[in-house]
Image (cartoon, rainbow, N blue to C red):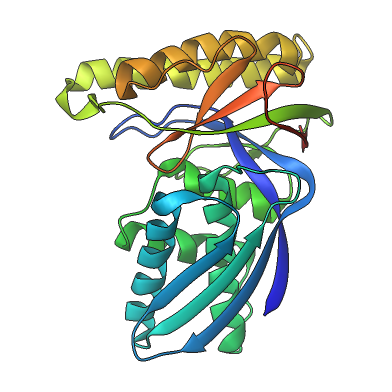
Amino acid sequence: MTLRAYRLALPLFGVPVLGKVNPYLVVVTAEPLVQVELELEEAEKPRASVEGARLGWRFELAVKSFVDTLSSRLEQPLAVRARVKVPGVEYPPAASVYAALSLAIVEAVAEAGGYELSREELLQAASSIDQDAAVWLDYLDGLRAAILRGESIVYRSGEEPVPVGHGGRVELELVGEQDIGEDISPRLSDPLLVAAARLTGTAVLEAVSALQSGEASLGDLFPLVARVEDGLFYALYGAEPAGEGCKLTPSLQRVYGVCMAGKGLGERVGFSL
């Protein structure tokens, strides 16, 4: 198996809204944290297995769909065996690990074919496969972009990522995944979805602006954004608020809890700003 290491990327601010393209603040760990051992070979039919971190059936289904779609494009079934570790994090965010693993698979296939893909080509390939595999979520491309750039960014699908450039570092506690309730987004009128998207988008951009200008620290902004976004996560998806000093972030058909250091029960991880 070939060992690859990636930074862990997290969509810290931003709420996905059905049919709308929203900005996200994507932060990355200061050091590579996601370790991927990958074995790739031709097979009679596509297969994908993942060992290591506890990531759940949604993650496994997303990886399987990704490998199935990639195999179809190549017109050659692939067998992918991966072992994933995120040292120090018992329950890592599934979306973040999926973003890293999907990059590892694309890189491995390109290398096996004797190709070297640019950062933009890697992103485009992984995003395109996601879309055909019905896995695509707008923030997944943001996670991959932040991983490959090695820096925290403001990301909106279809636009060039903007580095945060704060130069700081923050410790966050990674709490774990939480199921959502009923997704009422398909039942809402477009004006209501537009209003929800505008609210979360404005919250992200205002928070990033205050952070970059030095008007406020992440510790100041975190609880304010949390109240707005946790309210939207509950209103749209029935997800219970994360609690004081904590907030919800998007994951694979679930939400993931993140807290400021000292507020939660998860493992502390350092992120760059």
Location of residue 107 in the rendering, given as x and y in whole percent from the top left corner: 60, 73
| Vertical arrangement, residue 106 with respect to residue 206, above or below | below
- Horizontal arrangement in the rendering, residue 219 relative to residue 97 (left or right): right
Quadrant holding the C terminus: top right
- Name which quarter of the figure residue 70 lies in: bottom left
Query: Residue 31, how many percent across, how many down?
Result: 81, 48
Determine the residue positioned at 71% across, 9% down.
220
For image coordinates 49% across by 47% down, the residue present is 140
**Residue ID at (70%, 28%):** 173
Q: Quadrant of the N terminus?
A: bottom right
| Total number of numbered discs in the rendering | 0
Q: Is residue 248 above or below residue 159?
A: above
Looking at the image, residue 192 lies above or below residue 8 = above
Q: Nearer the viewer, residue 159 or 84?
A: 84
Residue placed most toward the observer, 128 or 240: 240
Residue 128 position in % (x across, y down): 40, 62
Q: Give the left or right position of residue 42, taking residue 71 as reference.
A: right
Drawn side of residue 49 relative to residue 5, left or right = left
* Residue 199 x, y percent position in the rendering: 42, 14
